[in-house]
Amino acid sequence: MRNKRYEDASSALDDVLFDGMVIMAGGFGLCGIPEHLITAIARKGTRDLTFISNNCGVDDFGLGILLGKGQIKKMISSYVGENKLFEKLYLSGELALEFNPQGTLAERIRAGGAGIPAFFTRTGVGTIVAEGKEIRQFNGEDYVMETGLTADLAIVKAWKGDVEGNLIYRKTARNFNPMMATAAKVTVAEVEEIVPIGSLDPDHIHTPGIYVDRIVEGHNFEKRIERETTRPRPVAEAGVN
């Protein structure tokens, strides 16, 4: 048995980070993001980073922290609408962007982890997404070729894990994290609880430990809501007569 546990996010990233590297970061909006690992990267000051992530957080949280410190030079993403700084940097030419339909981004990551260099999809045919890419016909329909994605490092967030790196994600936090864990040279997992070996039901494990190189237990997660939207309570429930 190999103990992959590290004491904190900073030590888990020691001897892994370098300027100009490509990093996959799990999460959807602010759900399921590796908060402490992102903060550790910010503190270490690693620069010229390319991030593969569904989005870039918000201005003062998630990957938005790294964006604000000038550490990110390129984003490979599918949604960037909640970050005003992202918009400003992109429009001024200070930030490069490789934009992807969301399903295409997920499949590019999955393909990279499975060792598939490229695949064809109908999504994006006839739009700017397909510009400069190979188009091929299958059964009379046009398909655009997309390449698989890999990275130097994947930082993922899970609910529970053991010291061998077996991971379980909770509800919608099981978004891009499982695919990213398979598609990088080094995968570091941040979990809410590290449990003893054998306590995880094998049928419930989403990411087998073979994909995870290091694991750290985080504390005091903020778990911010990107945009809180509620509806008025019914009169009876609100206690109004």
Image (cartoon, grey):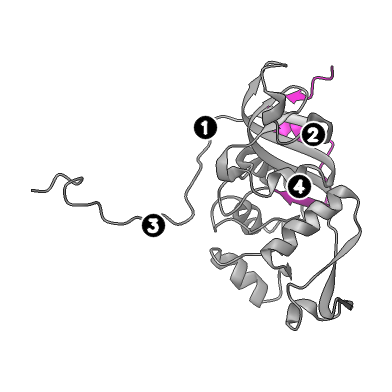
Drawn side of residue 204 relative to residue 13, left or right: left
Drawn side of residue 96 relative to residue 87, left or right: right
Labels 2 and 3: the sequence-earlier one: 2
Labels 4 and 1: the sequence-earlier one: 4
Residue highlighted by disc 1: 220
- Name which residue type carries label 2: Val
Labels 1 and 3: the sequence-earlier one: 1
Would you say residue 192 is visible in this rendering?
Answer: yes
Q: Position of residue 82 (x, y in %)?
A: 53, 63
Real-space Cα separation, disc 4 to disc 3, in angstroms:
29 Å
Q: From the viewer's side, name the closer residue of 16 and 122.
A: 122
Residue highlighted by disc 4: 180
Would you say residue 48 is visible in this rendering?
Answer: no
Q: Which residues are magenta?
A: 1-25
**Residues at discs 4 and 2 in contact (Cβ within 8 Å):** no
Q: Secondary structure at mark 4?
A: helix
Real-space Cα separation, disc 4 to disc 1, in angstroms:
24 Å
The mark lying in front, picked from 4 and 1, is: 4
Determine the image quadrant of residue 173. top right
Residue highlighted by disc 2: 212
Q: Residue at x 68, y 49 (%)?
A: 176
